[in-house]
Image (spheres, helix red, strand yellow):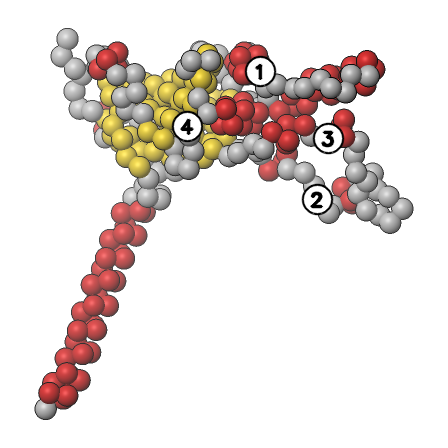
Amino acid sequence: MRFLKKSILDPVINFRSIAFWAIGLLLVISSCSSTGLSMLTRQSYHVDDQSWQEDTLKGFVFIPNSRVLVRTMHDEDSIFIEIRTRDSLSMRSMLTNGLSVWFDPQAKQNETYGINVPAARAEMMRRQEETFERIREEGDTLQRFTFDYASWTKSVSEKRFVITDKRGTRFDESDQVRISYTAEAGLAYNIRFGFSQAGIDKEKVDKFSVGVVSERHQAQMPNTGQSQMGGPTDRYGRPRQQPAARQDRPERLGLISVKGWIVFTLSEDKPAS
């Protein structure tokens, strides 16, 4: 009799367990789909909040799987995005590979509105080739190379940034991006993005997401095993190895990718003065 009761109840228990886990899975999927993927959420503070002066790290959050920090502030018209890092590898990578910062008023991961900071890779290769040419002429084989963060920050900050918003894609003519570097504070990107650039009413938006992407563009990837692309080959049709002085020197830096999205909620009121 006991065996009979157990055999009858087991399917009921199993069915309830399966239903419970199925409902839980649907809740997880639905919560993720509301933002594209599960993302960290932090608060965006009003620019007049005096606590920024009291705590310079307030509001910062690490981009997942990186040593890069991001925070946002806002006023009635704009979002102010601040990206910082003191990590040497992250700084080299972001300057070499460039940086794209995206603003999504739907709090998802749409790369529709944003700002692109050009990469310094091409100029680095040109300068390094010139340096190696001089070394070959002078016969100096002991010279070492150091990454001058201040110099490359200045070089990148003088380039033309690209804006993508409801008006299309164009060069930045209104100083929406500022880049700085100091040995004490590290590398910093300060970006302003107007609510009107995304064609949204700030009063109707309670949250948004910011995407920070710095990685080598696919078009820059070396062609491996594709001698048919026109590179020099040996007598067997294999790609001929390039002389050491002409190899892609920035690749030897061991660069990393930085990529992540953070959701920010808008504080409701302007702090009392």
Dividing the picture into quarters, in which one does residue 113 lie?
A: top left
Spatial CA distance of label 1 from label 4 is: 19 Å
Q: Secondary structure at mark 3?
A: loop
In this rendering, the label closer to the viewer, 1 or 4: 1
Q: Position of residue 255 (x, y in %)?
A: 56, 32
Q: Residue sitting at 24 percent across and 53 percent down?
A: 27
Residue corresponding to mark 2 = 224
Q: Crowdedness of circle 3 by 10 Å Cα count: few (<14), some, many (20+)? A: few
Spatial CA distance of label 2 from label 4 is: 31 Å
Spatial CA distance of label 2 from label 1 is: 31 Å
In this rendering, the label closer to the viewer, 2 or 3: 3
Spatial CA distance of label 2 from label 3 is: 14 Å
Can I make out residue 190 in this image? yes
Q: Position of residue 180 (x, y in %)?
A: 46, 13
Residue corresponding to mark 4 = 68
Q: Position of residue 97 (x, y in %)?
A: 56, 28
Amino acid type at circle 2 is: Thr
Can I make out residue 111 in this image? no
Residue corresponding to mark 3 = 247
Pointer 3 with pointer 4, Cβ within 8 A? no
Pointer 2 or 4: first along the chain: 4
Pointer 2 or 1: first along the chain: 1
Pointer 1 with pointer 4, Cβ within 8 A? no
Pointer 3 or 1: first along the chain: 1
Amino acid type at circle 4 is: Val
Q: Crowdedness of circle 1 by 10 Å Cα count: few (<14), some, many (20+)? A: few
Is 222 left, or right, of 147 in this rendering? right
Residue corresponding to mark 1 = 148
Q: Residue sitting at 42 percent across and 13 percent down?
A: 184
